[in-house]
Amino acid sequence: MAADGEEVLLGIYRALDAQRRDELLELARVLAAPAAEPRREPRPAGESVALAIRRLTRSYPMLDRRRLMGPASALMAQHALQGRAAAEVIDELELVFERHYRECRSAGRVS
């Protein structure tokens, strides 16, 4: 059975373009990781709010994105519709993700 799964996975990998192969390998690394620790990426200078959300989602793959959509969307709206500074919104987004991670970890939803 394992060999069949390996062949299927190898076939999928071979059918993907280079970018998708990299994404598949990253997912495999996440799934193979022994502990669900955030993989914090450095915050680039001049980062947009949308790119910050993507970075934080990559940094916290163990979190349920659906539970973060509400707070992240509200902060994005404050930036886009109310003119709140991107850096300020990104600071708060980082806190939202970290807080949610800590809550999930203490509740045992993240090992």
Image: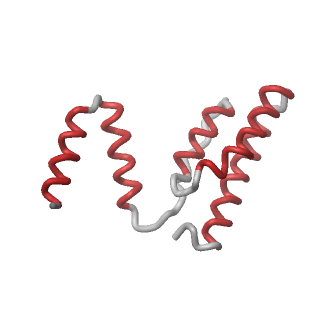
Q: Is residue 110 above or below residue 62?
A: below
| Residue at screen point 18% across, 52% down | 6
Residue extending farthest right: 82
Give the image location of residue 57, x and y in percent: 57, 46
Quadrant where the image shows the N terminus: bottom left
Side (left or right) of 4 relative to 65: left
Give the image location of residue 28, x and y in percent: 34, 52
| Residue at screen point 57% across, 56% down | 63
| Residue at screen point 63% across, 38% down | 52
Q: How many marks?
A: 0
Residue extending farthest front: 1
| Residue at screen point 22% across, 47% down | 9
Give the image location of residue 45, x and y in percent: 64, 33
Side (left or right) of 9 relative to 75: left
Q: Is residue 102 above or below residue 59?
A: below
On the image, which quarter does residue 87 sit in? top right
